[in-house]
Image (cartoon, helix red, strand yellow):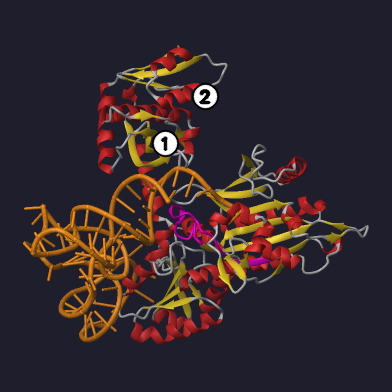
RNA sequence: GCCGAAAUAGCUCAAUUGGUAGAGCAAUUGAUUUGUAAUCAAUAGGUUACGGGUUCAAUUCCUGUUUUCGGCACCA
């Protein structure tokens, strides 16, 4: 998909189109006031104050029609530069423009404006020469959006659109949107019976169906094996903790609004746990540790509960009950770099296995001015942040830095991916933590026999199994690789009455090799059953008829491919087992 | 949580200005015995998300709740 923001020509066009949108809205809603209309990766939007009016989908059509009309009139777009004073005078009845003007650079005394026909807007530009250049655009959606992105402010109306310089590109873009919605994990999750929801269980509390459970189990086994090889020690801990536990960790102060409310039982007050760090801290603290024991890596597939905002809940991607692929690595300060490097390498390794290519490393740093969220120790923060940079540079990873995205206890590396629909999400994370070990009074004995405080790395490679599964569904469009597929092979006897028994024996032989088989002995035509095997995206379909029984061979067809291959049963078995073992994508 | 939209059979969708719901697929049964993307027929399937109101009459209008969807805000 084209990134419009990074394409100079399209960027100018889309920005001009935002002005065209504003002009059309002004025609239809003379009382409308305008905030900003920037270009984004997927087009543009404009934030508008319509007073008590709200946009509906019918209005969107009306506005688009008006835009076409204005564009057809073909007014030139004229730039002019006016003084700040003049700008303030000209827009004196528009509080939004006054806000914009007054926030501009002290040094810049000149402000540029663009006028097209009866409409003038403040703007740095540049713009296309004339509105008649804007032909291939479409308004896509609308919604409320807080002024200046702050939930405390008034909600404005936001209209999104996109503009291209030819019809084909616009149509291709709309086609891509359509295709994206086809691979939405919520759609595929329903079709393939991967998960469901039920009002009686609650919002954001998915139920994993048998097919989903198979996928999840494969993921668990996969990452468990990797972690075990790297010296992780896996544990099980309760899904609740006392409020005091979270007061000790500091999470209570920072996040109690985002936890399920506490419950009193006898003299104890519990919360459903939103994360596992405190439990793992206690496990580390359960005995004395020598510097020789470190790093100690405690891992758990741990179910957590978070009271996510109702509007944020989405399929398996953002839920209120999730299972983290969590681990806490307790290290000496000297080991931070090496251990962090191992985590990043593991992430790279796993992404390679899954063929995940489109992701971004985000180095999430503190906002130095936010002393409320982040504990106040500049030296410690600077050291930690530099350490992470160093490792990423060593490994040759490209990354971008995000100020104010760090956890309250330390900086972190997040891996971001783009789902089929909606904004980017974090998949993997690795977080450096100097704070919790102190709060839990953790220590190890160094080579001088003195007590030292360990450093903790929080890390989750899959993030949560829920979100990772959502992502993999969308990556594969529901056509899972053999090792993950809930049903790996469908066996279709040409004539169930004649070949069914042999097919069933084959099924049993393959099942003994731990393959997941569906035997389709329904009284339907072969083509009907083949079609269903294809539409349900089973990786391989096997056909058993007279020839195959006679030759003890297997004829099979790979999902999405046309031809059939025939191998001896022995060769076929090896062929499939190899693919499963190699986790072939 | 906020702004908007939606909820009809297991699934995907219909139902003209208010007159107690239809189709395709799936399911069940029967016929058919099949060689690579849909064989034919019959049957069954619904308190139209849930509650309240208006009306002689509500899937349809009003209202409350829940859930879902598109964004915004949030995301340890």
Dot 1 and dot 2 residues touching (CB under 8 Å): no
Q: Position of residue A42 (x, y in %)?
A: 43, 39
**Circle 2 is placed at which residue position?**
A103
In the image, residue A342 lies at what x, y percent?
A: 72, 55
Q: First in sequence: mark 1 or mark 2? A: 1
What is the number of the mark on residue A70? none
Q: Residue at x 72, y 63 (%)?
A: A281
Residue B34 placement: quadrant? bottom left
**Distance in Å between CA atoms under marks 1 and 2:** 26 Å
Q: Quadrant of residue A453?
A: bottom right
Can you say whether A137 is above or below A465 in the image? above
Q: Position of residue A434 (x, y in %)?
A: 74, 51
Q: Nearer the viewer, residue A585 or A9?
A: A9
Q: Which residue is mark 1?
A: A43
Where are the magenta residues, as a range? A299-320
Residues A23 and A85: in front is A85
| Front disc: 1 or 2 | 2
Q: Position of residue A427 (x, y in %)?
A: 57, 54
Question: Within 10 Å of the Cα at label 2, are there few (<14), some (14-19), or many (20+) other Cα atoms?
Answer: few
From this view, report whether residue A288 is shown above or below residue A80.
below
Q: Specify the quadrant that holds the N terminus of chain A.
A: top left
Name the image quarter holding the C terminus of chain A: bottom right
Pinpoint the chain carrying mark 1.
Answer: A
Is any atom of residue A483 visible in this view?
A: no
* SS type, badge 1: strand
How busy is the neighbourhood of tag 1: few (under 14 within 10 Å), some, or many (20 plus)?
many
The stretch drawn in magenta includes residue A576: no
The outermost residue toward the right is A448
- Residue at the extreme front: A267
Which residue corresponds to the image point at 60% horizontal and 74% vertical from the top-left? Answer: A266
Decide if residue A209 is in sight here: yes
């Amino acid at each position: 998909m084209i990134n419009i923001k990074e394409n100079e020509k399209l960027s100018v066009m889309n920005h001009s189109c935002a002005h065209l949108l504003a002009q059309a809205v002004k025609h239809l809603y003379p009382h409308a006031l305008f905030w900003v209309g920037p270009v984004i990766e997927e087009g543009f939007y404009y934030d508008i104050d319509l007073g008590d009016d709200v946009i509906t989908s019918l209005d969107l059509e009306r506005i688009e029609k008006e835009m076409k009309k204005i564009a057809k009139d073909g007014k030139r777009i004229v730039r002019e530069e006016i003084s700040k004073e003049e700008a303030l005078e000209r827009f004196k009845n528009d509080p939004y423009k006054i806000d914009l003007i007054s926030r501009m650079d002290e040094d810049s005394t000149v402000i540029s404006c663009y006028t097209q026909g009866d409409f003038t807007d403040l703007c740095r530009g540049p713009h296309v020469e004339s509105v008649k250049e804007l032909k291939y655009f479409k308004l896509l959606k609308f919604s409320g959006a807080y002024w200046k992105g702050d939930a405390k402010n008034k909600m404005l109306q936001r209209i999104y659109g996109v503009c291209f310089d030819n019809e084909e590109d616009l149509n291709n873009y709309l086609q891509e949107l359509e295709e994206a919605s086809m691979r939405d994990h919520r759609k595929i999750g329903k079709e393939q019976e991967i998960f469901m929801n039920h009002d009686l269980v609650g919002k954001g509390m998915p139920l994993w169906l048998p097919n989903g459970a198979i996928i999840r189990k494969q993921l668990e086994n996969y990452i468990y094996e990797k972690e075990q090889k790297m010296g992780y020690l896996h544990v099980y801990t309760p899904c609740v903790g006392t409020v005091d536990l979270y007061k000790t960790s500091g999470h209570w102060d920072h996040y109690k609004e985002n936890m399920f409310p506490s419950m009193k039982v006898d003299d104890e007050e519990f919360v459903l746990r939103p994360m596992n760090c405190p439990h793992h801290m206690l496990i580390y603290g359960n005995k004395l540790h020598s510097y020789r024991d470190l790093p100690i890596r405690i891992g758990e597939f741990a179910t957590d509960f978070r009271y996510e905002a109702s509007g944020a809940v989405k399929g398996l991607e953002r839920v209120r009950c999730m299972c983290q692929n969590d681990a806490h690595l307790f290290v000496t300060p000297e080991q931070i770099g090496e251990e962090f490097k191992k985590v990043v390498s593991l992430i790279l390794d796993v992404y390679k296995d899954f063929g995940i290519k489109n992701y971004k490393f985000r180095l999430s740093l503190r906002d130095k001015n936010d002393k409320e969220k982040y504990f106040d120790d500049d030296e410690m923060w600077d050291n930690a942040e530099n350490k992470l940079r160093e490792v990423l540079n060593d490994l040759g990873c490209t990354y971008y830095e995000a100020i104010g995205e760090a956890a309250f206890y330390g900086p972190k590396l997040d891996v971001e991916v783009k789902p089929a629909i909606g904004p980017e999400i974090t998949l993997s994370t690795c977080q450096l933590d100097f704070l919790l070990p102190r709060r839990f009074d953790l220590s190890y004995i160094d080579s001088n026999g003195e007590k030292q405080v360990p450093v903790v790395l929080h890390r989750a490679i899959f993030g949560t199994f829920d979100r990772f599964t959502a992502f993999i569904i969308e990556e594969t469009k529901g056509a899972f690789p053999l090792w993950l597929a809930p049903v790996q092979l469908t066996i279709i006897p040409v004539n169930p009455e004649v070949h069914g028994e042999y097919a069933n024996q084959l099924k049993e032989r393959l099942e003994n090799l731990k393959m997941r088989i569906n035997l389709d002995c329904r009284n339907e035509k072969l083509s009907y059953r083949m079609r269903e095997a294809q539409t349900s995206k089973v990786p391989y379909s096997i056909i058993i008829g007279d020839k195959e029984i006679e030759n003890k061979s297997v004829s099979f067809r790979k999902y999405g491919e046309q031809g059939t291959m025939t191998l001896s049963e022995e060769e076929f078995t090896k062929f499939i087992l190899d693919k499963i073992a190699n986790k072939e994508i």
